[in-house]
Amino acid sequence: MTGDRIGIVGLGRMGSAMAERLAKRGFPVTGWTRSGLSPQRAAGLGIAAAGDLPSLSAASDIVILALLDDAAVHAVLDGLAAAGPAGKLIVDTSTVSPETLRVHESAMAEKGATLLDAPVSGGPEMLLAGTAGLYIGGAEEDFRRFLPVAGALSNRIHHAGRLGNGASAKLMNNMMLMGFWEIMKEAVQLGGKAGLLRDKMIEILSGSPAASPAMTSRLPVILGETDSVGFPVSGVLKDMGVVFDVAARLGVAIPAIEAAHASFRAAAALGHGESDLGTVVRLALEGKD
């Protein structure tokens, strides 16, 4: 375990899971969120609460960001820069553009701070179990400093290269999953129209070479047996927006993701924006897509 003190900015589902996991593994953790962190909630997570971002920074050696989007990351990095970040390692686990942290790299270096991007593959339950994936971009020295913390959160740690490459790797991984859900939706639509029964289709697909942990873990959602949410449709649409922005900048055609985007957008329009992403396939099985 590291002697570094950990600060976590953003205590939504992912940030809270990271905070709880690290605290249980013996790391000293302080948390702060713009919406406020009550003493009761902090105690429930096993962490200390900071009253503001400068206080969080002062109490931390490694600051981990778990935020919604690029705008939030830019704002927090500006706030940390103003708070005097010398000697600190700032690690962003949000799903954002590869360019987001690069914009701040020089300014942070001038203030004596370093940056890593380390977006997470998997949901809160995987973070709590230490089985989430981490795609990390940044200098080797900074990666090594963060490794004891990363090892408490993940058993799939990939150092992808320079700063921003972690975000690129996460977007690539997300695109594979986005495409998978679109293909499964189309497959059950075709199978249903061809006369196959729902349960038989699921039996065949879940036992096929195309089956994956992402699919099998969401079978209860797909079959309508639970309304639990691992990752919402709205989150997929937000991440797709990042993919579209990066693809446009790089001149890469992504027709499969465009088709998937239409499916997730349709699910949101039907009132399922905060439902689990597996709902896209459930709606197809029910003929409501």
Image (cartoon, rainbow, N blue to C red):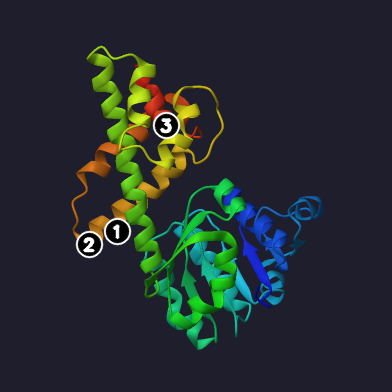
- The image quadrant where one finds the N terminus is bottom right
Mark 1 highlights which residue? 246
Name the N-terminal-most of marks 1 and 3. 1
Task: Find out whether the residues at labels 2 and 1 contact each other: C-beta distance under 8 Å.
Answer: yes
Tell me the element at label 2.
helix
Tell me the element at label 3.
helix
Q: Which residue corresponds to the image point at 35% horizontal and 55% vertical from the top-left?
A: 171
Q: Amino acid at mark 2?
A: Leu
**Marks 3 and 2, how far apart in space?**
28 Å
- Counting from the top left corner in percent of width and height, residue 95 is at 44, 56
Q: Which residue corresponds to the image point at 48% horizontal and 36% vertical from the top-left?
A: 217
Mark 2 highlights which residue? 250
Q: Dividing the picture into quarters, in which one does residue 158 lie? A: bottom left
Residue 30: give its label. none
Residue 268: give its label. 3
Where 34 sits versus 264, above or below? below
| Residue 277 makes an appearance in the image | no
Q: Dividing the picture into quarters, in which one does residue 165 lie? A: bottom left
- Counting from the top left corner in percent of width and height, residue 4 is at 66, 77
- Judged left or right of residue 40, residue 231 is left
Taking depth in this image into account, of 149 and 274 the one nearest to the observer is 149
